[in-house]
Amino acid sequence: MKTLMIFDQLVTLNRERHREHRIDASRIDHGFAAATNSVPIAVDELGEAALHYPCVFIEREGQHALCALLGLAPQQNLFVDADRHWLEGTYVPAFMRRYPFALAETGEASNFLVCVDEACTGLNTTVGEPLFNEAGEETRTLTEAKQFLLTLHQAFTTSNAWCDEVARLGLLEDRVLQFVRPDGSTGQLTGFKAINEERLRQLPPDVAQRWLTQGHLLAAAAHLVSLGQARRLGMMAARAQPAAPAATPSDATAPQTTDEVAA
């Protein structure tokens, strides 16, 4: 069963359990994402993501976030090909690039545990970059992976705060995206929100200036431009192979031991 959308066997990275484990990047493909039809993105990714995906706002329990749409049907990722590779020349969101690692909350502010997907094709005990040295100390490979996870966590914290501000300012509206199915019929993408362009033009001057300085004004424009990528999804679906086997996302609960690796 997949957890957090893309993980099959997510466990806490353990200094003893994973002492001999290595990461062979050449053996990691994107099959783990083949059954995911959307992916969370951070606001600072919008400039690149908007060139390839419809980037929309979602609301869950009163909180708002950004995501990129990858397919037109459940468990359909049009950007992972039959060879399990991400479509060449398209931006791979950071949420996917962190694989096979993830962070788990400990219940204490700013404290996290590093987790790893033991089902990852590149995780093994014979070839690749080691996670720990002979003394059980973290290698540069693991240190860099942890830094990427922490940087990504901060990016999403900043991004979600901006998304909530967009909502508080009344800029969001329910939106429907039209697309053409492979059989020629038309369909709709629903269940998400987008910025109302007219309301954006009426943004208070002080907010507009702050957003300009922060790069968020350009991000809002990129989001609006990205909505046209729904047509691209329709064309890609017309050429796509049958959808990948379904996955059942759920929340991850990683086991904890005395040798867990903290971020």
Image: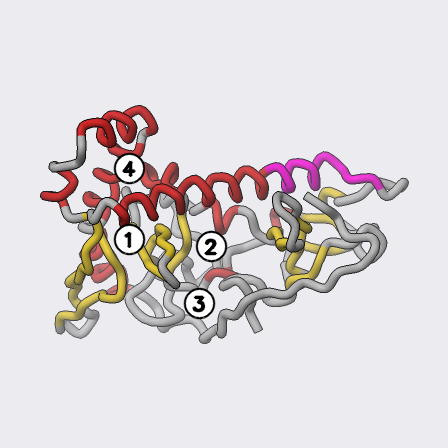
Q: Which mark is residue 219?
A: 4
Q: Residue at x 63, y 41 (%)?
A: 145
> Label 1's element?
strand
Q: Which residue is mark 2?
A: 85
Lower position in the chain sequence, tag 1 or tag 3 = 3
Q: Is residue 153 left or right of residue 258?
A: left
Q: Nearer the viewer, residue 249 or 78?
A: 249
Q: Nearer the viewer, mark 3 or mark 2?
A: 3
Instruction: Report the number of numbered marks.
Output: 4
Q: Main secondary structure of the magenta part?
A: helix
Q: Residue at x 75, y 45 (%)?
A: 131
Up/down of 181 relative to 31, above or below: below
Q: Residue at x 65, y 36 (%)?
A: 144
The amino acid beneath tag 3 is: Ala
Magenta segment includes 10:
no
Q: Position of residue 71 (x, y in %)?
A: 32, 63
> Label 2's element?
loop
How far apart, in angstroms, are the residues tagged by discs 4 and 1?
12 Å
How far apart, in angstroms, are the residues tagged by discs 3 and 2?
13 Å
Q: Quadrant of residue 119?
A: bottom right
Q: Which residue is mark 1?
A: 56
The amino acid beneath tag 1 is: Val
Q: Nearer the viewer, mark 3 or mark 4?
A: 4
Q: Nearer the viewer, residue 22 or 95?
A: 95
Q: Nearer the viewer, residue 112 or 52?
A: 112
Q: Nearer the viewer, mark 2 or mark 4?
A: 4
Q: Is residue 129 left or right of residue 35?
A: right
Q: Which mark is residue 35?
A: 3
The amino acid beneath tag 2 is: His
Using the rendered image of the protein, determine whether residue 157 is visible from the camera's viewpoint. Answer: yes
Magenta segment includes 143:
yes
